[in-house]
Image: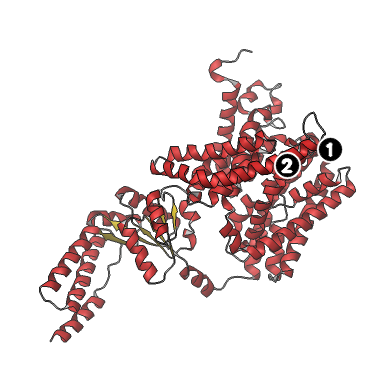
Amino acid sequence: MAVDPLFSPGFRDALVILGATGLVIPAFHRLRISPVIGFIVVGLLIGPSGLGGLGEALPWVRHISIADREVIEPFAEIGIILLLFSIGLELSFRRLWDLRQLVFLIGPAELAISGGLIGFILHQFTDLGAVVSLMLGIALAMSSTALVLPMTGTKSAIGKPAFAMLLFEDLAIVPIIFVMGVISPLPGSDDAGDLTRTVILGAVVVAALLGLGKLLLPPLFRQAARTKSPELFLAVSLVVVMGASLVTSAVGLSPIVGALVAGLVIAETEYRMQVEVTVEPFKNLALGIFLMTVGMSLDFELIAESWPYLIAAIVGIILVKALVTGGLLRLSGVPRGVAANVGVLMASPSETTLIVLAAAVQARVIDSDTAAFWQIVTAVGLTATPLLARIGSDTARRVDPPPADLIEASRSSGRTIIAGYGRVGQMVADMLVRHEQPFVVVDADIDMVEFGRKRGHEIVFGDVGRSGLLEHLGIASARAIVLTMDDPVQLVATTRDVRTAYPDLCIIARAKDAEHAAQLYRAGATDAVPETLESSLQLAEAVLVDIGRPMGLVIASIHEMREIKRNKIKAMVPNLPREPLKAASRLRHSDEETAE
């Protein structure tokens, strides 16, 4: 049958992938099921084991399915690279230091003991070698960052130890992937000298990437940031990660190593947060395609033939990891209920396990048949993770619910976010410093970021209009956000978005004039400060003081006039409370008595 050149197989496959993603994944989200599971299920449905296998009997099915999973494997490899790049971005030295006890004590103990036990069992009951069994055991001992953290958070009693162990696992993937690249059998040679050459050359290349990255990446991203072009910034980010991956693959290492190194280098610069937010949509889509390939690789015949072994493997892994993780946390002083529930929710394998398996096959450490079996185990385990996490989270709240006064105290101890570091943002930051209040500043002008850092302020590069940036800044636990940008449209849009996402957050916004302030109040601002009003009041204060009026009386009248004008602005917006004038009136009365 002739194929229309305007509707090539590649174009059809792309439509199937995007169509399945656009239709099915929102349905899973609506059902509150993780997209990770959704991508695997979609891959299973449209892949060779699902609708793709019916193409011969039902020709029309070819238009809504994919019969050959290899056509999307290059995109899946990009997904793995971007995921490892994002993991590298999260592994800043400051973050590791803050959780150093949990990360470097419980984390390695859990991974080593769980991986060692699973590897020992595999070596005893299968024909796998000791090295392969150990590598598989470590891979299966990893837990799902993509599934666990969104369900538990990072600050709850159950989320903090889970986050610390997941952080160590993300860090541990660096040497794991490196070792796999090193022990990979070299084509056409068994000479140990080739292995030594790979190790030495790989170490030199990684060291060179780290050194050159620290020298070259900051000025490169600085020039991209100064253009204020999101497209150019995205292009530079992708060129960096792909270039590093090509360099490491050229010397015989996995391209994943280069992606990790690129992320580690950028994590120590002021561009980390903006790069992470910029790459996030592409990473999620590419990772979704990777998970689709996992679903496509699930073989119903293999499942039917090996289901007793699959069940035994899944149950065994969950039991080993739950007992080891819960026991280690209990020994470290974590309450019994929290330790047990952290162990349960982190007991299944993870999407990182799939990445390690893919790297192991690529490095020819294990064969494709062995990897296929454990991919099924991991995929089924992933589908159980949300259930385990929900049970663990609910049980943790019943066993150790946080007191209401503790919740209020944690809210009151949060920091203020200042969006914009122009003249207004600088003044707000200086006053917060004077009153010893914690804050963080975000600005999209790299020159202002560098200026703020020279002044000793905590400031990061980023655009508050980008989705996800404020979440990375910790807005969920912030005391307030101060919007000082000079773009009136962006101010209103950001105010509306923040108020929708965080109904109880204090939002103070800079307004151009009274009408703009009214728009900000309608958008949800707690307070809007018109520039024209403040400049007029300062002029009036200077005039009154210079012509001899008492300072106290002038200040009281200025405060009273500010409240009158502010209430007039609020009157333009229905259902907004007006402020009383009691404080200003009392101060004016006191100053009149003093003047007499």
Is 590 above or below relative to 146? below
Instruction: Give the crowd class for mark 1: few <14, some 14-19, many >=20 residues within 10 Å.
Output: few
Which x, y percent locates residue 569?
24, 60
| Residue at the extreme top | 2
The residue tagged 1 is 305
- Image point (41%, 71%), residue name: 436
Q: What x and y, as percent, mark residue 40?
A: 66, 40
Disc 1, SS: helix
Left or right of 406? Residue 187 is right
The x and y percentages for residue 241 are 56, 40
Left or right for 334, reference 364: left
Q: Is residue 317 left or right of residue 581?
A: right
Q: Residue sitting at 73 percent across and 42 percent down? A: 199
Which residue was labeled with disc 2? 199
In this view of the protein, can residue 232 be seen by the observer?
A: yes
Q: Is residue 292 left or right of residue 533?
A: right
Residue 124 or residue 303, whichever sits in front: 124
Q: Residue at x 23, y 76 (%)?
A: 584
Can residue 153 be seen here? The reply is no
